[in-house]
Amino acid sequence: MVDYDVAIIGAGPAGLTAGIYCARYGLKTIIIEKGLVGGTATWANSIQNYPGFNDISGMELMMKFKEQAQKAGAVIELETVTQVSEGGKEKTLTLGEKKITVKTIIVAVGAKSKWLNVPGEKQFLNKGVHFCATCDGPMYNGKEVAVIGSDNRAAEEAIYLSTVTKKTYLISPKKELTAEQAKLDTLKEKGISILLETNVTGFEGKEMLEKIVVKKNGKETKMNLSGAFIYIGSDPNTQLVNTNKDEEGRIIVNEAMETNVKGIFAAGDCIKKELKQISTCIGEGAIAAHSAAKYIQNKNID
């Protein structure tokens, strides 16, 4: 006798959406979250690109997701999954000192952005320091900001920010950017100032970010900027599951959000994909739930 039809690991946008759909399909559903319900989406101070809301905080939006999942019948448990085991028709999850058995699993553990680990960074989170230009960039209309990073993602975000801000800088500790040539050409066309071999060593201000401290050739200076968007990479939290992954550890899925392991699906920022947004995560969560329901139905028929 299984404890649940489906266990969803992670309560971010993808996990909560999967929970809503699974519960509405009539599946006995548990959503397991080791940290904050809503995930990193709760960090966004102002979301202006989510359909249906002109402007809403990440925390408020995610609490609406949570309420809807619980109203649909999904159980949300704050606990850490320490092991996922397969055995026969069921799968076993170890949560602290207890174990639960499930018919299928949806992995929606997301990814955590890498921090610079410099003074002021966490102090000014959502007060000038951000990890999502698409979410928070419009707040800096008419102001000067910086993107910190070197790759395609950093270049893309700098290009986007140049359309909504007065001035955008791209700060990289490397001798050359690793972004593709087409993006380098666009950076130049947009008039984005690129500061190479420059390290960000701190953030300063009173209530809001006012200055970014940078160091180049051993000399430290301060830039008067209102916003900083950090893109030095992210780490997917996928160590728990033994599925096919890319070189960064992101889970490889097909269009049905199926992994290479039968009965295990994945959705959200932990999977290999192009665009990481709340709107894409909810679509993936809905598809994963649909696929999980079909998998259970077919297995029961068999």
Image (spheres, rainbow, N blue to C red):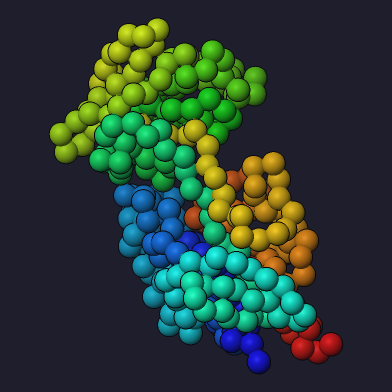
Q: Which residue lies at the image location 42% right of the left edge and 71% below the top edge?
A: 78
Quadrant for the C terminus in the image: bottom right
Displayed quadrant of residue 181: top right
Left or right: residue 211 versus residue 32 is left
Quadrant for the N terminus in the image: bottom right
Identify whether 16 is placed above or below 47. below
Q: Which residue lies at the image location 29% right of the left edge and 21% below the top edge?
A: 213
Count every numbered label the image shows and give the total.
Answer: 0
Q: Nearer the viewer, residue 205 or 239?
A: 239
Residue 139 place in picture, x, y as percent:
31, 40
Residue 138 place in picture, x, y as percent:
36, 39
Identify whether 265 is placed above or below 23. above
Displayed quadrant of residue 168: top left
Residue 77 place in picture, x, y as percent:
44, 75
Residue 214 place in picture, x, y as percent:
34, 18
Identify whether 181 is placed above or below 253. above
Q: Nearer the viewer, residue 82 or 208?
A: 82
